[in-house]
Amino acid sequence: MIAGSLKHWTTERKFAHPVLRKAIDFLAETDFGVLEAGKYPIWGDDMFALLMANTTKPKEEQPAEKHERFLDIHLLLEGEETIGWQVQDGNSKPSAPYNPEEDFALFTELQDETLIKLKPGMYMVLFPEDIHRPGITEAIATDVRKIVVKINQDLL
């Protein structure tokens, strides 16, 4: 997992893999204020962005997820969101088995989940070994607007 802020992207960009650069450059250069919710291609079916609006939920109501084929980059545009994170260590068992067509397994209980609070402009890069619980709140539910870039790991 990598956490960062678009405020620092121009100086941190040189440290990123070229595929991550392409994805985060897209996030940094796109005016999402003029776009509606939906799917936006970046590199065909291998890299695309999902622009969405959600309401955060208590941790107990939001399952965690893990992907096998795609990396995620979650960028918060509006609101506040907490994302739970844990490296897959074999101790946490999925509550729903891996669905290869949708590329996710779901988890309810995690052994060592770390909560990371995102504010607008902050992003998280989540790799296939990262179990993550997006869209949670530690207090009152809030509306968020965010974008998730999906990257096929074969590009790396």
Image (cartoon, rainbow, N blue to C red):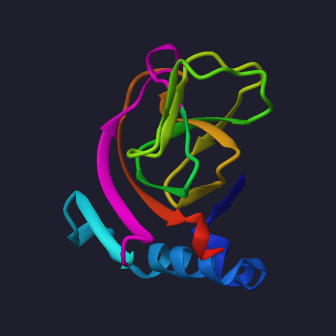
Q: Residue at x 57, y 46 (%)?
A: 118
- What is the magenta range? 44-64
Please state the horizontal and vertical placement of residue 88, each as a whole percent of the image. 74, 36
Please state the horizontal and vertical placement of residue 138, each as a whole percent of the image. 55, 23
Indicate left or right for 149 with 10 as reference: left
Indicate left or right for 133 with 14 as reference: left
Q: Residue at x 59, y 75 (%)?
A: 155
The answer to whether 105 is drawn above or below residue 45 in the figure is: above
Q: Nearer the viewer, residue 14 or 154?
A: 154
- Total numbered circles: 0
The answer to whether 49 is drawn above or below residue 155 in the figure is: above
Please state the horizontal and vertical placement of residue 156, each as a whole percent of the image. 66, 74
Q: Residue at x 52, y 75 (%)?
A: 23
- Residue 61 sits inside the magenta stretch: yes
Q: Nearer the viewer, residue 100 or 25?
A: 100
Quarter residue 49 falls in: bottom left
Q: Nearer the viewer, residue 93 or 130?
A: 93
Indicate left or right for 18 with 35 as reference: right
Q: Residue at x 64, y 76 (%)?
A: 9
- Residue 96 sits inside the magenta stretch: no
Please state the horizontal and vertical placement of residue 37, each as a whole percent of the image. 22, 57
The answer to whether 68 is drawn above or below residue 47 in the figure is: above
Q: Residue furthest front?
A: 100
